[in-house]
Amino acid sequence: MPKFVCAQVRLCPSSFVPNNRWTDPTNNEVPRFKRCFVSCAACIHVAFGCGIKFNAIDATYSRHSVYRQGYLHMLSTRDGNNKILPLAWAICETESGPTYEFFADQCHAAGLHRYMTRNSVLFSDRQKGLEKFHERFNSHRGRCVLHIIRNARDHIRGSGQIFQNKTVWALQEADTEEKYLEQLEILRGESEKAADYFDDLPHEEVYLYAFLQKGVRTHGHKTSNIAESVNWFLNEARHEAPYRCNDKICTWIGKEFAARTETMQKWVEQGHMLTPYAHNLFATQVCAHMIALCPHDCFVPT
């Protein structure tokens, strides 16, 4: 195993922190895998260089036939082209307060507290001990609306009231407080109890208008997809034993870096100075403010 890890780190420079001290019921230490932490230096370097500081923390269970009770904890962000960028991950024996505390300590030691500052946001589903992770960093907090919808349905169960998911999404996506209040009344028309539940949530952690008031940019993402977005590329890795799971993730990162580098080289050769994502932002947001409609029904720059 040590040779395997050394080869892996040599191919993908990273911090690797094993924790193989397992205590059995008689309080004796057993040389058995317990936890490990990996932070990818290349990904962290890219994040500091051009990351958009829109981050997610989540954990997903292992599908390995033996290590099936283990959980893969993942911290990810978005690069300058709005693509997923894994920053660090930990494979632990469960998902709980102590495992998130371990993960937070290692992420902090890897220097990620300098990336997750007050001008960033960290989304999560806020389940099973995530508070321990949030406490270590200064990022604004974001909640997963998909999980909130599920909780709201549990809350109104038995009341005879129902609401539509699209009404809640419209409520979350309202970009001003006035629009939020208008959507809240629409939701109240469907379910009084659900409207009270959603309005009682901390607005600064859920609703777009509150994020914008704090100067936090969500880059068009809903709070439901950012915390869960890493699971799709982890699906294959989840079937592997812990060390081979690390290898799968590092391999995915290497392939993605190669593909993204090729894409950006072609983009630069075409004379572009910004990434495709930043280019589109400039075209849709900046240029739109430079155009006005004149009295003769033609567009002129202002």
Image: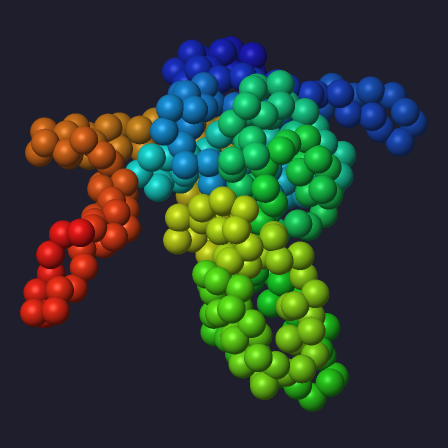
Report x, y in % for residue 57: 57, 41
| Residue situated furthest front in the rendering | 295
Report x, y in % for residue 240: 52, 36
Look at the picture and state if 59 lies above or below 244: below
Please name whichever residue, 74 or 173, is drawn nearer the observer in this view of the structure: 173
Report x, y in % for residue 160: 69, 88
Q: Tell me if I can see residue 234 in this picture.
A: no
Q: Tell me if I can see residue 254 in this picture.
A: yes
Q: Could you say which quadrant of the image residue 16 lies in?
A: top right
- Coloration mode: rainbow
Please name whichever residue, 207 or 9, is drawn nearer the observer in this view of the structure: 207
Look at the picture and state if 9 lies above or below 235: above
| Tally of numbered tags | 0
| Residue situated furthest bottom in the rendering | 160
Look at the picture and state if 298 lies above or below 96: below
Please name whichever residue, 202 or 149, is drawn nearer the observer in this view of the structure: 202
Q: Quadrant of the N terminus?
A: top right
Residue at point 83%, 26% (across, down): 23
Residue at point 18%, 59% (across, down): 292
Residue at point 61%, 53% (across, down): 204
| Residue situated furthest right in the rendering | 26
Residue at point 77%, 25% (across, down): 22
In this image, 274 relative to 91: left or right? left
In this image, 163 relative to 80: left or right? right
Report x, y in % for residue 217: 45, 46
